Amino acid sequence: MVVVNSPSSQTLRADASTQGASSAIAVHNLGMQLPAGQHLITILQTISFTIPTGQIVAIMGPSGSGKSTLLGLMAGLDRPTAGSIVIQGTDITTLNESEMARFRRSHIGYVFQAFHLIPTLTALENVLLPLELQGRSQGKDRAQALLQSVGLEHRLHHYPIQLSGGEQQRVALARAFISQPSILFADEPTGNLDSQTGERIIELLWQLHQEHGSTLVLVTHDPSLAKQAPRILTLRDGHLIADSDHHPETHFS
Ligand SMILES: Nc1ncnc2c1ncn2[C@@H]1O[C@H](COP(=O)(O)OP(=O)(O)OP(=O)(O)O)[C@@H](O)[C@H]1O
Ligand SMILES: [Mg+2]
């Protein structure tokens, strides 16, 4: 394990972030403060790291340490109050709302911790939505195949309210995969699943990575998922406290 808050390694990582154009993600001196009553609270502080294209990275850390906030910032769902985030050569902190939305649609898949399915659309329609937003009418077969691969072939026409939490999570995963994003962010993708379904989701993630060279950034508390990621970033109290490379038990990359 490499502890990153020594001066020499911090310098190394800051240097690496200037190579943002050749990496999938380069985060430099990222900070996030939010108002809480009369005060500003610091949620993330001086975070820097670079993720090469095609790498699988797990983000771990205690509840409240800033994992979802960091993931949302990297996916352009929110704006940081300090620092830069360069995704495939574009500093997304400089994009306006509509540029950001377009960038997200063409590069990024995101699985929310709270699923965020559209309640008035069926499972199948939810999965097809990203393609429709891109103006693509094809894809029903692929959407069905994806729902089948997450074990939901018998729930295609159910609405989110008619699905269990784990089933909603699997629909959210299928939706994130439909446009074959070059970067997939997933917030606790196996968090609400039994171990067998969790394994199936890990296999799907692995497949996306293998077939499309997708970069995967996964927030997880799940040791069986984390141990298969070749790199783990650890947050505590809004700081990046460790950046470890290790050999995964199975060949996940
Ligand atoms: N909009 C907000 N306004 C104020 N504080 C916020 C806001 N969003 C998050 N926070 C705070 O920021 C901290 C980090 O939240 P975050 O959701 O990133 O944590 P997390 O590491 O994902 O936790 P968990 O493992 O429980 O999902 C928490 O203390 C949370 O209360
Ligand atoms: Mg979270």
Image (cartoon, rainbow, N blue to C red):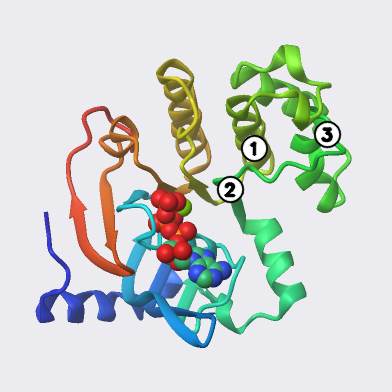
The x, y position of residue 209, in whole percent, is 46, 39
Please tell me which residue lies in front, 32 or 230: 32
In the rendering, which numbered label is found on residue 172? 1
Q: Quadrant of the C terminus?
A: top left
- Could you tell me if residue 23 is visible in this image? no
Which of 173 and 193 lies nearest the eye of the viewer?
193
Residues 218 and 43: in front is 43
**Which residue has dot 3 on it?**
125
Image vertical order of residue 90 relative to residue 94, above or below: above
Secondary structure of the residue carrying tag 2 is loop
Q: Earlier in the sequence, mark 1 or mark 2?
A: 2
Q: Name the residue at 66% across, 26% down.
A: 146
Determine contact: label 1, label 2, CB under 8 Å. yes
238 to 93, vertically: above or below: above
Left or right placement of residue 51 versus residue 38 in this view: left
Residue 5 visible somewhere in the drawing: yes
> Which image quadrant for residue 250?
top left
Check disc 1 and give the amino acid type.
Answer: Ala
Numbered disc in front, either 2 or 3: 2
Residue 86's spot in the image, x, y percent? Answer: 48, 74
Q: Amino acid at mark 3?
A: Glu
Q: Residue at x 37, y 50 (%)?
A: 55
Say which amino acid is labelled 2.
Answer: Phe
Which secondary structure, mark 1? helix
Horizontally, residue 84 falls left or right of residue 48, namely right
Labels 1 & 3 near each other (Cβ < 8 A): no
Using the image, tell me which numbered label, if any, was put on residue 192. Answer: none
Q: Which residue appears farthest toward the top when viewing the image?
A: 154
Q: Quadrant of the N terminus?
A: bottom left
Residue receiving disc 2: 112
**Does the numbered disc 1 mark a residue whose Cβ is under 8 Å from ligand 2?**
no
Q: Position of residue 137 (x, y in %)?
A: 89, 40
